[in-house]
Image (tube, rainbow, N blue to C red):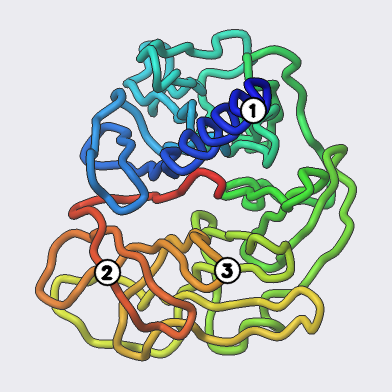
């Protein structure tokens, strides 16, 4: 009886811990990277840097530093990881470049993919979560533009990326598994090198950050209207998610039917972070003046 009671108490304790575990939200604001609860509360500045990406378990934050280079024109950027419990930041100095950006965690949290400048060209780099085991992912077929915004498949065995002409799925050795012409899947829109992809939790759908071709007049806005499209990997069909008058970009899946995104409303000078359902409704503000959102795993 005593043993049974202890087991019940232990199970209830585990359940309480699980219930108390909150997903974490990461974003960029000003010149710093931030972490908050998934509803936007308890926001905390972690470090100076750009393009934060939170680990699947919510315990670590990868980002890139950003400082003026003392040896060449342009910024000096290194991949760094912050331990959110201790606040310790580790900069990966063994990577053979002082110009790396945009780290993204693999689904199991064991690896980080990122863009790296080497041999006067952009490449895709992979490194273990502790900074060891760096290697390039190269394929002569892939243009340098393809490495601006990589995103992992849900099984961690491949990466989706794009250039100005094509969308790719590549394995971790750089072999092209699938290739889609952007002109065929986006008949009324295009993509630039920084436009983002996000893989759905079931791995069947991509959210695509696109630039619309049709002109849209708006004060305080320079450039094409940004929008979010959904790409079904099985049918290879796209559909527009956001409304015709909405300026929305930087999508990131939150649940099976919701995503995070940036919205800049008319008469605003800066975007803010929102959550939105896939039908373009149920829009909720999470953080003002925020950029590059992502979230830990469920």
* Residue at which label 1 appears: 7
* Residue at which label 2 appears: 284
Q: Is residue 192 visible?
A: yes
Q: Position of residue 200 (x, y in %)?
A: 63, 64
Residue at x 69% of width, y 21% of height: 128
* Dot 2 alpha-carbon crowd within 10 angstroms: few under 14, some 14 to 19, many 20 or more: few
Tell me which label, 1 or 2, sits earlier in the chain: 1
Q: Is residue 80 above or below residue 279?
A: above
Q: Mark 1 to mark 2: distance in Å?
A: 41 Å
Q: Position of residue 32 (x, y in %)?
A: 27, 32
Towards the viewer: 288 or 70: 288
Tell me which label, 3 or 2, sits earlier in the chain: 3
Q: Is residue 103 visible?
A: no
Residue at x 62% of width, y 8% of height: 94
Q: Quadrant of residue 172?
A: top right
Callout 1: helix, strand or loop? helix
Q: Quadrant of residue 24?
A: top left
């Amino acid at each position: 009886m005593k043993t049974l009671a202890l087991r019940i108490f232990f199970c209830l304790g585990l359940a309480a811990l699980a219930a108390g575990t909150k997903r974490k939200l990461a974003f960029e604001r000003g010149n710093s990277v931030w972490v908050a609860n998934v509803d936007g509360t308890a926001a905390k500045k972690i470090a100076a840097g750009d393009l934060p990406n939170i680990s699947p378990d919510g315990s670590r934050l990868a980002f890139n530093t950003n400082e003026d280079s003392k040896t060449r024109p342009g910024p000096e950027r290194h991949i760094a990881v912050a331990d959110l419990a201790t606040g310790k930041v580790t900069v990966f100095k063994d990577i053979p470049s002082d110009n790396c950006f945009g780290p993204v965690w693999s689904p199991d949290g064991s690896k980080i993919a990122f863009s790296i400048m080497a041999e006067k060209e952009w490449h895709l780099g992979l490194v273990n979560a502790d900074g060891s085991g760096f290697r390039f992912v190269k394929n002569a077929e892939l243009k340098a533009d393809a490495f601006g915004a990589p995103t992992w498949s849900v099984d961690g065995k491949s990466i989706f990326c794009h250039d100005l002409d094509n969308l790719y799925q590549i394995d971790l050795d750089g072999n092209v598994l699938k290739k889609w012409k952007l002109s065929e899947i986006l008949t009324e829109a295009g993509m630039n090198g920084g436009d983002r992809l996000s893989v759905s939790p079931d791995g069947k759908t991509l959210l695509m950050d696109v630039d619309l071709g049709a002109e849209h007049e708006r004060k305080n806005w320079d450039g094409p209207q940004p929008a979010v499209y959904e790409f079904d990997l099985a049918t290879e069909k796209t559909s527009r998610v956001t409304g015709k008058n909405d300026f929305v970009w930087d999508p990131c899946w939150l649940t099976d039917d919701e995503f995070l995104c940036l919205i800049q409303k008319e008469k605003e000078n800066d975007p803010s972070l929102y959550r939105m359902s896939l039908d373009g409704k149920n829009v909720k503000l999470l953080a003002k003046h925020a950029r590059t959102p992502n979230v830990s795993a469920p």
